[in-house]
Image (spheres, rainbow, N blue to C red):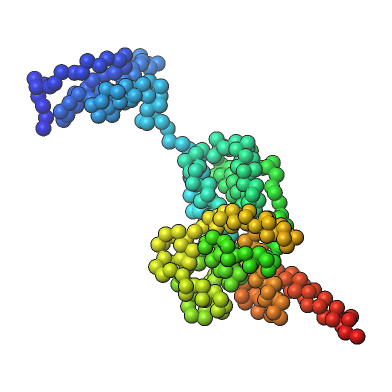
Amino acid sequence: MIISNSKKPKKLRIHRERLKWVWPRNGSEWAPYHRVTWTDGSGKRKERNIKLNWEGDPRKLDDEYWAAEAGRHPTQRKPPKHTWAECIREWRSDARIQMKLSAGTKKSDNREFEKILEKNADKPMSSTPRAAIRKKHNNMSSTPRAADWMLQAVSILWNYAKEKLDWPLGDNPAQGVDKFGAQRASLAWPDWLLEELTSAPDEVRIGAELIRGTGQKPSAAVRMLRSAFNGEWVTVEDEKGDKNFEIYCPSRLRILIDQLETGPRHVLAKSESSPFSYNDIEKSFRAWRATLSSVAKENDDDAKRYSLHGLRKRACVELAEAGCSDAEIQAVTGQSLETVAKYRVEANRKAMSRTAQMRRFAN
């Protein structure tokens, strides 16, 4: 309903230098505006008005007014340009880039990009200093591979934005930050550590059985679906995560799966539809591993030497020691023949040393 001028309520007695009360044509109450006026070079009077959303609250009116005075009012803020989110969108939609990458590379790159988006989506790339990248890299020292992947992801996006999008960026902040580099090969879990799994949290114990039983990468094993298990067979991912294929499921693993609570879609379920992440399981594993120092000492060992990846190596070595051919091992783990050959050498050395020593003392 439009109120006539004769029936307009009185203006509020709130005065500020640039506060103006305006009666809208179709309004029913006075609206406060922050108004700035000036004269341009041609002598023409100009003005800029910002409506203050005060909701009838004098204190909120004060906040809105002084925010406008300081240039901090939402309507005065310019949307950030050249953000990390914008760069990632451009990279993902660039056909020339995407057609050159394998499905596995896209998957791993996008995984790292999602981590960047979590806290930096709307931040301009140019506001990212090298000191912040170096600090983040150092804070990730407990997971050196992930730390180096983070540097690689930053470099990929920075170089793409600067060289392909012609964004006005300075030097790559990841350049000059020393990587942790290639890590030592994962050690296969010893018998004593496998025996201690009975004391591990359920998510670690079940995750360990998935890795050892399927021979998959830990990151793939921990997010397995219940539907991947079908009688004697289980569907697993190949080495690069590009394809799925079926392998024979060991009876030990089948029994474990059958004993789990039914309902959730994933074997290691955080909720009905979401799995635990690899980081969740790895963090729980490290906490459990820290409790094994006395047991490790009894076995003249150090629990810190072992990681979840060592379970996959244990699976490969067990297959090799059981007399499986390289092709048979590859059929389970999906690894390259070159990688399988490394495990073969280790298993053959043990087998040949046994034969040699038995012959040596046979007589």
The answer to which image quadrant residue 174 occupies is top right
What quarter of the picture does the C terminus occupy? bottom right
Residue in the image at 36% along x and 15% along y: 39
Q: Position of residue 11 (x, y in %)?
A: 19, 18
Residue in the image at 45% along x and 72% along y: 227
Image-based side of 227 in relation to 60, left or right: right
Q: Which of the pair 252/291 is nearer the observer? A: 291
Q: How many marks?
A: 0
Q: Position of residue 218 (x, y in %)?
A: 59, 63
Is residue 256 among what the camera can see?
Answer: yes
Q: Position of residue 94 (x, y in %)?
A: 52, 53
Q: Position of residue 226 (x, y in %)?
A: 46, 70
Q: Which of the pair 296/72 is nearer the observer? A: 296
Q: Is residue 245 above or below residue 36?
A: below
Residue in the image at 25% along x and 25% along y: 57
What quarter of the picture does the N terminus occupy? top left
Image-based side of 266 in relation to 17, left or right: right
Q: Which of the pair 204/198 is nearer the observer? A: 198
Is residue 160 among what the camera can see?
Answer: no
Q: Which of the pair 207/76 is nearer the observer? A: 207
